[in-house]
Image (cartoon, helix red, strand yellow):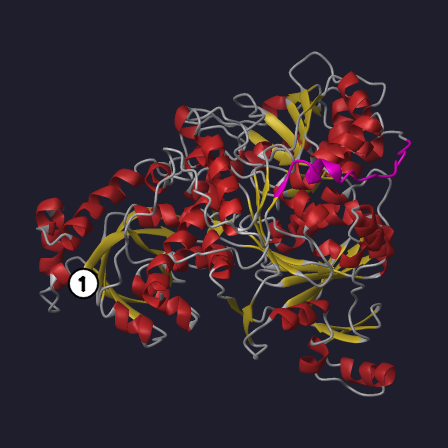
């Protein structure tokens, strides 16, 4: 059903595929009359045209992008604006939309969530932005309805910033990248490769967008086929998908680790903009007659069956049919894989005990957020459930429409009443179920969700408290089919249903009467409202000539998610307080990390204050004594900090706090075989941390000290390899690399963080 091409491909007239191999020259000559170069044909992609229109560098190999619009939610916008304010912000130079869809439940920490919202509203007034109150819309649905535009580019501080189906190239990045845009700087990257996703055929009845997305994720995640690349959706199958269906596939491209996405557009997308009263934003997009792609994912939509992504990753996919046919074997395999992720001997994790009379029973179903809460998903789910009842046992079903306009239309057409009659509960627009701030399952519970991620503990359980629950990702239609069978896993293709497909009507007055729109109208006299939890970033020191690092955490999981680096859930409420949030760093992966990092930080604080660092950290005296047997290094002039080693860190969320919390605790570097995403590596850099690479078996272990000689010189002089030493009996030497860095990124690291960099340029 899915084929990955081994080579690049030429796409002719949007339909004919010519693989870049030994036979391609003759085929191109025959079909085109000439043989276009790959370099010229690459300009025929939709992605190239959009990037070129937004590039300010004059060099299409080294891009400096300025985005049309920015968007953030209430987990991220406080830190972003605080960073920008500390760096000289006077007003928002581009439309910046602040939504409030993550910390919308004021159940943790008293007033702190609502204090963040009031901070956001006052900043929208002062700097000229837009503010979307809580429960009005999840961030990405609002962006689809009100921000997206053909040929535009949007940058968001949420990893699922994906509006490619609407002709908008959107990217999710850490907060510092939005700060750069707010300060009239650019998003600097090498031109990304572009991979075509060729869709053909039409989905089977009952197969939904999550099924297509999970099948693609399963095919490309593990091999990195689209990592940091743009996925460009083309082919005759696109026309067979509704706008809502395309959106549902598109939002999940984040889980492939691609950089962004873009789709061909047509009359269905034009109608989407007309429905949302913004017809001028539609732009027809398609590849040129000859376009070259760096790879191709060929998807026969007609052959994809209802899918399920088992714990603990969206790429751990099976067809529901396959799972039901090989239930005990697959569950046993999933349990074994889970032990690697959980890494906790005190947890008894089991799925096989959920098999009742040969069928898999689940305790919870959730249809929610930017992926599941769309109009078409909810209507189709209601069609499957209409006239049935979810039962009075453990199984529950919650539905979260993605925005108030969607919710209102579902009320008007009777869908909400139909769902409630089944025993399902319907909630307002809220992202909580996606990151553990709502609908946490019971201990040992299994939840099936049409949401974006199913990482360990992301659903809200705490392994450090002896709790474990898990999530399997599914499409809304199969969740509804399972609910109709009162919790027993069922594919939507196995039920007889008449999908009514009601027409959607968008009521814009909901936003017109409730959303504050101050874009282009800053009022400098407005005073920003600070709640008691909102704190400034602490001072951060510049990089010294040499650096000493203590390895305080060592993670050998194949992939480490940002949720494991800084947990989601109720910890999100503290994200306006850098020091408060830092207390949760690695709390569900390595609970002793914070204490170890703080011990090292005592020495650095003493050094900066001109005090005796060895009194603050006695073991450091022996470390420097050993270093000075070989080199002449002055402790008072040498930065000392903590460091994390992980095989492949940074999969998942764009949240900058995965890096900033380490820095706040005195973290100075990561060492990794590779970084899971560009955005996590960028977060490290923007917080002044060294993103070291070491591809081999490591010569150090937790508790060791590493001395990196002449690190400042290596950064500024762009040295490819950097000598480092494990401080021990023999000062064992090894070599690190930093990978490609722009000149600005090098200076950010040198200055100690993005805030220091901007202060130096003010």
User: Residue at the location (51% across, 60% down)?
Assistant: 181
Q: In front here: 462 or 85?
A: 85
Q: Quadrant of residue 48?
A: bottom right
User: Would you name the residue on which mark 1 appears?
Assistant: 731
Quick check: can you spot residue 23?
A: no
Q: Residue pushed farthest top?
A: 392
What residue appears at the point 61 percent right and 63 percent down from the top-left corner? 229
Whether residue 160 appears in magenta in the rendering, the answer is no
Q: Would you say 622 lies left or right of 584 here?
A: left
Query: Looking at the rendering, which quadrant does residue 706 occupy?
Result: bottom left
- Residue 89 falls left or right of residue 323: left
Q: Read off the magenta span.
A: 498-516
Q: Taking 713 as reference, is 1 above or below it?
A: above
Residue lying at the far front in this picture: please name it: 525
Residue 263 vertical placement versus 434 (above, below): below
Query: Residue at left 62%, top 37%?
Result: 310
Where in the figure is residue 591, as x and y percent of width and height? 34, 35
Residue 319 percent coordinates (x, y): 73, 40
Give the left or right position of residue 674, taking residue 148 as reference.
Answer: left
- Badge 1, how many Cα within 10 Å: few under 14, some, many 20+? some
Is 505 contained in the magenta span?
yes
Residue 650 in the image: above or below residue 717: above
């Amino acid at each position: 059903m899915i084929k990955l091409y081994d080579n690049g491909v030429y796409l002719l007239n949007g339909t004919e595929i010519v693989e870049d191999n030994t036979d391609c020259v003759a085929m191109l000559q025959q079909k085109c009359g000439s043989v276009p170069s790959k370099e010229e044909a690459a300009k025929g992609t939709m992605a190239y045209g959009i990037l070129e229109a937004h590039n300010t560098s004059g060099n299409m190999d080294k891009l400096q992008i300025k985005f049309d619009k920015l968007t953030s939610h209430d987990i991220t916008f406080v830190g972003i604006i605080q960073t920008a304010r500390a760096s000289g912000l006077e007003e928002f130079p581009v439309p910046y939309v602040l939504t409030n869809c993550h910390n919308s439940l004021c159940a943790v920490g008293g007033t702190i969530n609502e204090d963040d919202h009031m901070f956001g509203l006052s900043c929208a007034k002062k700097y000229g932005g837009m503010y979307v109150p809580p429960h009005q819309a999840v961030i990405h649905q609002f962006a689809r309805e009100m921000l997206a535009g053909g040929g535009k580019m949007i940058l968001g501080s949420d990893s699922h910033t994906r509006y490619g189906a609407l002709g908008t190239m959107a990217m999710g990045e850490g907060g510092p990248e939005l700060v750069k845009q707010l300060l009239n700087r650019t998003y600097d990257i090498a031109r990304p490769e572009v991979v075509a996703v060729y869709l053909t055929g039409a989905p089977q009845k009952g197969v939904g967008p999550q099924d297509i997305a999970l099948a693609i994720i399963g095919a490309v995640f593990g091999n990195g086929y689209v990592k940091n690349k743009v996925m460009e959706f083309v082919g005759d199958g696109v026309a067979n998908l509704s706008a809502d269906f395309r959106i549902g596939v598109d939002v999940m491209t984040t889980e492939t680790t691609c950089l962004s996405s873009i789709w061909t557009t047509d009359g269905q997308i034009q109608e989407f903009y007309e429905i949302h009263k913004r017809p001028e934003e539609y732009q027809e997009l398609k590849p040129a007659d000859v376009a070259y792609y760096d790879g191709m994912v060929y998807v026969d939509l007609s052959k994809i069956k209802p899918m399920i992504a088992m714990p603990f990753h969206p790429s751990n996919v099976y067809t529901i049919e396959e799972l039901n046919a090989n239930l005990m074997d697959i569950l046993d395999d999933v349990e074994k894989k889970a032990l690697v992720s959980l890494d906790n001997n005190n947890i008894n994790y089991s799925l096989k005990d959920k098999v009742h009379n040969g069928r898999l029973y689940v305790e919870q179903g959730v249809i929610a957020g930017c992926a599941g809460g769309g109009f078409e998903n909810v209507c189709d789910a209601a069609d499957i459930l209409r006239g049935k009842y979810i039962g009075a046992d453990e199984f529950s079903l919650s539905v979260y429409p993605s925005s108030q306009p969607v919710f209102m239309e579902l009320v008007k057409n009777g869908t909400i009443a139909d769902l409630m009659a089944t025993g399902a509960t319907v909630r307002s627009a809220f992202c909580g179920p996606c990151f553990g701030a709502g609908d946490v399952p019971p201990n040992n519970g299994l939840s099936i969700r049409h949401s974006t991620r199913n990482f360990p503990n992301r659903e809200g359980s705490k392994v450090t408290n002896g709790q474990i629950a898990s999530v399997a990702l599914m499409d809304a239609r199969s969740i509804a089919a399972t609910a109709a069978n009162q919790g027993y896993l069922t594919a939507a293709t196995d039920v007889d249903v008449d999908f009514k497909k009601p027409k959607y009507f968008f009521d814009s007055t909901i936003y017109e009467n409730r959303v504050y729109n101050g874009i282009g109208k800053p009022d400098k006299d407005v005073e920003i409202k600070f709640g008691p939890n909102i704190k400034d970033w602490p001072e951060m020191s510049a990089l010294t000539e040499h650096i000493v690092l203590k390895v305080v955490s060592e993670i050998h999981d194949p992939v480490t998610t940002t949720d494991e680096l800084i947990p989601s859930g109720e910890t999100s409420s503290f994200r306006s307080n850098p020091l408060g949030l830092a207390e949760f760093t690695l709390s569900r992966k390595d609970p002793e990390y914070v204490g170890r990092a703080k011990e090292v930080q005592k020495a650095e604080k003493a050094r900066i204050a001109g005090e005796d660092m060895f009194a603050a950290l006695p073991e450091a005296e022996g470390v420097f004594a050993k270093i000075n047997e070989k080199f002449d290094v002055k402790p008072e002039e040498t930065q000392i900090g903590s460091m994390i080693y992980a095989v492949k860190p940074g999969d998942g969320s764009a949240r900058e706090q995965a890096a900033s919390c380490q820095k706040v605790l005195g973290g100075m570097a990561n060492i990794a075989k590779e970084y899971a995403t560009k955005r996590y590596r960028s977060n490290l850099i923007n917080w002044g941390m060294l993103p070291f690479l070491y591809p081999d078996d490591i010569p150090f272990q937790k508790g060791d000290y590493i001395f990196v000689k002449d690190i400042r010189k290596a950064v500024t002089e762009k040295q490819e390899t950097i000598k480092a030493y494990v401080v021990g009996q023999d000062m064992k030497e090894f070599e690190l690399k930093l990978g490609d860095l722009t000149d600005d990124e090098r200076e950010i690291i040198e200055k100690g963080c993005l805030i220091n960099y901007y202060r130096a340029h003010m």
